[in-house]
Image: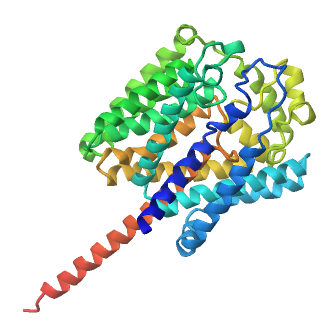
């Protein structure tokens, strides 16, 4: 019986992660609508919200079952909870308090899931659960692309481009980038059926290419190269320091060459120096941030179309972006420099712990926290996933940050026990002459 309950719990975890990623109900309920289909009525996503409520309830119940460990985990990372408090209190200065309240409730429910992941599974177990999640997404995307072309491929502006089980090609590319890295890390381990992981890696790359999303492909290449850097961190200091100096020098030269030839490189990738128009309206966003620099406009209260503060951006830019296409700008818009500072502090602490984790774990899965945290930085230069309710990337990021806190404490405890045993052994073996 216990075996089946554990299996059911893992199935719940995988299916919840899949739902957080936006698959496959968004594209199904929208009827396969694509960008540019303005004539199609707005779809009803009530079912999606209902499923999120079920996930919140089940997750809360699972947390109650291990409440002591959960409370200990909450006490390990105050910055994320302070950030949540800022979001909650932003109801009082939000221009649309009802909207902020609704989204804060969803954000609070969302935070339950990474809390559950970190308290229930090790980082290695989380990696395998993600492999199952991405595996289902890959198989489903191929089935949709070939069997349900109206859903699996886009029409309108991006006609023929793959989107798989997601509502947009960019979402498919964004999900497949960490998918490629998960399968690559597992394929590099001495495990059975490694060919399955290599297959998952190749399929992830294929779907990124089929989605014609260039940013995720660049991110995967960058993250793959970063694995070599992480390996260097495991070397002895007398080899590691010169190697890092050499890499820094080469990176500086590469940066100079790229900035010098930026226009040609952008043209080669099918882009322009404005990142497909993104940088054109960023100065307008910075002006809006300057109006409310410290605490922002309230959580979820800026990008509300013509009815919110975003109307000024839409009117001045002549474009209707749903967000800043930059996670750092969006966080600053909603919670100001205070919110952004809390996030940055928590992130940097997590990154340092991830680098320490690389040195303490000798297998390739030890690279996962550092790889994903690097991906967060890269992806949020052109996307927005830093503090979003019901968002897959936010869930994984927080679960990693919390899990690293646990690993750090376990390492400290292990060192103390080892040191104590060494002292006791010395006392037993020492004899007075």
- Give the residue at the far left of this rendering: 433
Looking at the image, can residue 225 be seen? no
Q: In which quadrant is the N terminus drawn?
A: bottom left
Whole-percent x and y of residue 265? Answer: 52, 11
State the residue at coordinates (53%, 32%): 140
- Give the residue at the far bottom of this rendering: 432
Whole-percent x and y of residue 414? Answer: 34, 70
Looking at the image, can residue 346 be seen? yes
320 left or right, relative to 230: right
Vertical order, 266 against 108 (above or below): above
Q: In which quadrant is the C terminus drawn?
A: bottom left
247 left or right, relative to 293: left
State the residue at coordinates (74%, 60%): 85
State the residue at coordinates (61%, 47%): 344
Q: How is the image coloured?
A: rainbow
Asked where in the image residue 172 lies, by quadrant, the reply is top right
13 left or right, relative to 184: right
Asked where in the image residue 360 lies, by quadrant, the reply is bottom left
Total marks placed:
0
Whole-percent x and y of residue 320? Answer: 82, 23
Asked where in the image residue 144 lies, by quadrant, the reply is top right
């Amino acid at each position: 019986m216990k075996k089946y309950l554990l299996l059911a719990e893992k199935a719940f975890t995988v299916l919840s992660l899949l739902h957080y990623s936006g698959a496959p109900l968004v594209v199904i309920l929208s009827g396969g609508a694509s960008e540019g289909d303005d004539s199609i009525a707005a779809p009803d996503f009530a079912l999606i919200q209902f499923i999120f409520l079920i996930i919140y309830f089940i997750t809360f119940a699972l947390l109650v079952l291990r409440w002591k460990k959960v409370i200990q985990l909450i006490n390990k990372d105050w910055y994320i909870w302070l950030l949540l408090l800022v979001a909650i209190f932003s109801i009082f200065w939000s221009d649309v308090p009802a909207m902020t309240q609704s989204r804060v409730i969803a954000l609070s429910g969302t935070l339950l899931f990474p809390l559950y992941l970190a308290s229930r599974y090790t980082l290695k177990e989380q990696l395998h659960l993600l492999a199952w999640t991405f595996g289902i997404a890959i198989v489903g995307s191929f089935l949709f692309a070939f069997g349900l072309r109206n859903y699996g491929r886009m029409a309108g502006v991006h006609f023929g481009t793959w989107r798989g089980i997601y509502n947009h090609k960019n979402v498919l590319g964004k999900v497949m980038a960490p998918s490629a890295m998960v399968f690559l890390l597992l394929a590099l381990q001495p495990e059975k059926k490694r060919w399955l992981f290599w297959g998952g890696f190749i399929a992830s790359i294929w779907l990124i290419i089929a989605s014609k999303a260039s940013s995720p492909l660049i991110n995967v290449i960058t993250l793959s190269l970063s694995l070599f850097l992480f390996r260097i961190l495991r070397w002895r200091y007398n080899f590691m320091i010169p190697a890092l100096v050499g890499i820094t020098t080469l990176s500086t030269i590469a940066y100079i060459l790229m900035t010098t030839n930026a226009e040609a490189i952008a043209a080669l990738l099918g882009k322009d120096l404005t990142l497909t128009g993104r940088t054109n309206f960023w100065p307008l966003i910075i002006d809006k941030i300057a109006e409310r620099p410290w605490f922002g406009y309230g959580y979820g209260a800026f990008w509300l179309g013509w009815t919110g503060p975003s109307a000024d951006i839409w009117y001045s830019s002549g474009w209707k972006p749903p967000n800043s296409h930059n996670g750092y700008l969006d966080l600053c818009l909603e919670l100001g420099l205070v919110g952004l500072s809390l996030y940055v502090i928590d992130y940097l602490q997590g990154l340092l712990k991830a680098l320490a984790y690389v040195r303490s774990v000798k297998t390739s899965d030890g690279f996962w926290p550092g790889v994903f945290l690097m991906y967060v930085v890269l992806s949020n230069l052109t996307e927005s996933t830093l503090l979003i309710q019901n968002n897959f990337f936010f869930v994984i990021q927080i679960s990693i940050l919390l899990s690293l806190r646990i690993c750090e404490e376990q390492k400290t405890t292990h060192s103390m026990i080892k040191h104590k045993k060494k002292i006791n052994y010395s006392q037993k073996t020492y004899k007075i002459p």
